[in-house]
Image (cartoon, grey):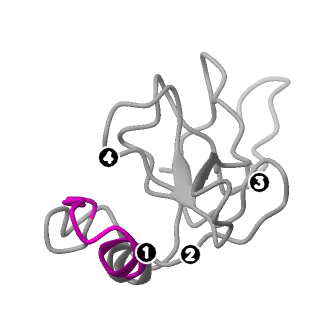
Amino acid sequence: TSEGWKDEPVPQQAVDCYYDNGSSYRGTTAVTTTGKKCQTWISMRIAILIVFSFVFVSYTPSAYPNNLISNYCRNPDGEPRPWCFTSLLTKRWEFCNIPRCGKYHLCNY
C-alpha cells in the first residue's frame, strides 16, 4: 500500500450486455424481452424449411460457426439489437432481454 491507499480486490462480475447493435455479442442469454425461451438456431432452420419450403434461411450454425451457438441471442443480420427465434407461429422472432452496455464498464484483467 502507499500513503492513505489500501489495496483491496475489485469484485469481478460477469458483464452480459451488448454494444452498438449487438453484432459482436457472445453472451449466453436465451430469453426474449417478453420472457419467451429462445429456440436453437439449427431447429429453427429445419422448422422454417418444412413450413416454408421456398424460403432459404441462412441463419445456421455452419454459416456462422462462432456465432449461432445453442439457443443464445445473437444478431447475425444487422437488426438494432440481439434477437432469437421463438416457438410462436405468430411471432417467429423477438429481440432479447439483454441490456445495452454503458459507455464504460469494468474489464476483467
* Dominant secondary structure of the residues highlighted in magenta in the image: loop
Q: Is mark 1 in CB contact (under 8 Å) with mark 2?
A: yes
Q: Does dot 1 land on a helix, a strand or a loop?
A: helix
Q: Is mark 4 in CB contact (under 8 Å) with mark 1?
A: no
Q: Nearer the viewer, residue 22 or 39?
A: 39
Q: Is mark 3 in CB contact (under 8 Å) with mark 2?
A: no
Q: Identify the residue shown where x is 30% and y is 61%.
A: 67
Give the image quarter of residue 38: bottom right
Q: Earlier in the sequence, mark 1 or mark 2?
A: 2
| Nearest-to-viewer mark from 1 and 2 | 1
The picture places residue 51, in percent across and down from the top left corner, at: 40, 75
Q: Earlier in the sequence, mark 1 or mark 3?
A: 3
Q: Does dot 3 land on a helix, a strand or a loop?
A: loop
Give the residue number, with chain letter if any, for mark 3. 11
Reply above or below: 82 against 34.
Answer: above
What residue type is disc 3 on? Pro
Q: Separation of disc 2 and disc 4 at Cα? A: 15 Å
Give the residue number, with chain letter if any, for mark 2. 39
Report crowding for label 4: few under 14, some 14 to 19, many 20 or more residues within 10 A (C-alpha).
many
Quarter of the image for the N terminus: give it: top right
Q: Separation of disc 3 and disc 2 at Cα? A: 33 Å
Q: Identify the residue shown where x is 25% and y is 69%.
A: 60
What residue type is disc 2 on? Gln
The picture places residue 61, in percent across and down from the top left corner, at: 25, 73
Give the residue number, with chain letter if any, for mark 1. 44
Q: Does dot 4 land on a helix, a strand or a loop?
A: loop
Report crowding for label 1: few under 14, some 14 to 19, many 20 or more residues within 10 A (C-alpha).
many
Q: Earlier in the sequence, mark 3 or mark 4?
A: 3
- Give the left or right position of residue 55, taking residue 103 as reference: left
